[in-house]
């Protein structure tokens, strides 16, 4: 049911999304590895949301401390920052960089 304009970005990202999901699912005992793949997956999901829309307001959040202070992004349904990269250690660290409607 995708248009040609929607199919192209999905086809480019599909295999990467599956790989990241697999790594996250199979490495429950290795949070560092899961976070690495979550970071990459978040970039892919952001690209999909930009191509398809989110159907609601989504917040593109940034954690400046992750990956040796190189930073990382994630999407959230909440305006309040809930940082997935540092969990309870720094759960509110980060900023909303973009609101996607």
Image: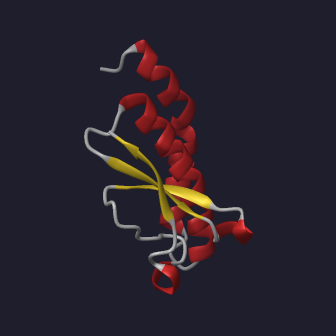
Question: Taking 3 as reference, is 54 above or below it?
Answer: below
Q: Where is residue 56 in the image (x, y as percent from the top left)?
A: 26, 43
Question: Taking 70 as reference, is 65 above or below it?
Answer: below
Q: Who is closer to the viewer here, 65 or 22?
A: 65
Q: How many numbered circles are shown?
A: 0
Image quadrant in which the N terminus is located: top left
Q: Position of residue 19 (x, y in %)?
A: 56, 50
Identify the colour scheme used: secondary structure
Left or right of 5, for residue 73: right
The residue at the far top in this view is 4
Q: Which residue is drawn at 62% across and 69% down?
A: 33
Task: Tell me which corner region of the image, top left, top right, bottom left or bottom right, holds residue 23.
Answer: bottom right
Question: Taking 94 as reference, is 18 above or below it?
Answer: above
The residue at the far bottom in this view is 89
Left or right of 68, for residue 46: left
The residue at the far left in this view is 56
Q: Residue at x 41, y 67 (%)?
A: 81
Question: Taking 61 as reference, is 64 above or below it?
Answer: below
Q: Position of residue 20 (x, y in %)?
A: 55, 53
Image quadrant in which the C terminus is located: top left
Left or right of 83, for residue 33: right
Q: Position of residue 77 (x, y in %)?
A: 31, 56
């Amino acid at each position: 049911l995708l248009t040609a304009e929607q199919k192209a970005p999905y086809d480019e990202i599909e295999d990467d999304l599956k790989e990241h999901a697999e790594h996250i699912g199979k490495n429950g005992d290795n949070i560092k590895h899961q976070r690495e793949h979550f970071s990459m997956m978040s970039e892919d999901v952001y690209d999909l949301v930009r191509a398809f829309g989110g159907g609601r307001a989504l917040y593109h959040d940034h954690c400046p401390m992750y990956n040796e202070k190189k930073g990382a992004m994630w999407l959230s349904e909440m305006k309040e920052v809930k940082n997935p990269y540092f969990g309870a250690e720094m759960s509110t660290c980060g900023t909303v960089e973009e609101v996607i409607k």
